[in-house]
Amino acid sequence: MNRPDIDEYFLKIASVVAERSTCHRHHVGALAVRDKHILSTGYNGAAAGLKDCLELGCLRNERGIPSGERQELCRAIHAEQNVIIQAALHGVSLEGSTIYATHTPCILCAKMLVNSKITRYVSFGKYNDDAFRDLFREAGVFLEIKERPSSQITYLD
């Protein structure tokens, strides 16, 4: 049996979190981790209690808006934004944490993460917005792009 390393472990968890997404385009999951402890999780979807794209359809698809553009027209709150919001709601600082996510961040999420004082961002997927790279470099946020983890779960029965 091959035991996943810590990055693969948390990326697999981010992938499971992404399964809760209500987006028609991308299922994105993210979690904040510090000292191998999960601080908060988030996935992309409409604000709590509001109708989402599964119910209403995708406004961006209807208007032909390409991925990575005009994010303000989307009903969804991004996974990274939800990680920050959930941490704030529960009084948890993200300072010094690592974000594990299924996709790289948009520039808006990257700005929020920099201000949250994260130190590392680990992903295996790419979002259609590379503007975050220069921001992370300038802010000293270490970026790592890993291989997509196996979706297989090993059970010992």
Image (spheres, grey):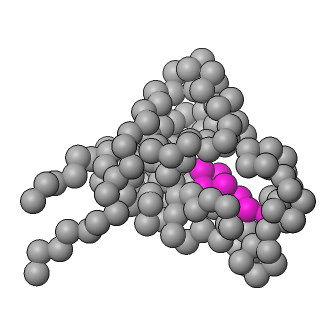
Q: Based on the picture, tell me whether residue 80 belongs to the magenta stretch.
A: yes
- Residue 88 in view in this figure: no
Please identify the quarter of the rendering in which residue 46 is found. Answer: bottom right
Q: Position of residue 64 (x, y in %)?
A: 86, 56
Q: Position of residue 139 (x, y in %)?
A: 58, 22
Please identify the quarter of the rendering in which residue 55 is found. Answer: bottom right
Q: Position of residue 16 (x, y in %)?
A: 43, 66
Residue farthest along the front direction in this orientation: 64
Q: Which residues are magenta?
A: 75-81
Please state, as top left, top right, bottom left or bottom right, where the C terminus lies in the image.
bottom left
- Residue sitting at x 73%, y 49%: 67
Horizontal arrangement in the rendering, residue 81 relative to residue 92 (left or right): right
- Give the answer, above or below, for where 102 lies relative to 145: below
- Residue sitting at x 68%, y 67%: 24
- Give the answer, above or below, for where 142 lies relative to 113: above
Horizontal arrangement in the rendering, residue 34 relative to residue 80 (left or right): left
- Residue 79 in view in this figure: yes
- Residue sitting at x 34%, y 53%: 149
Q: Based on the picture, tell me whether residue 55 belongs to the magenta stretch.
A: no
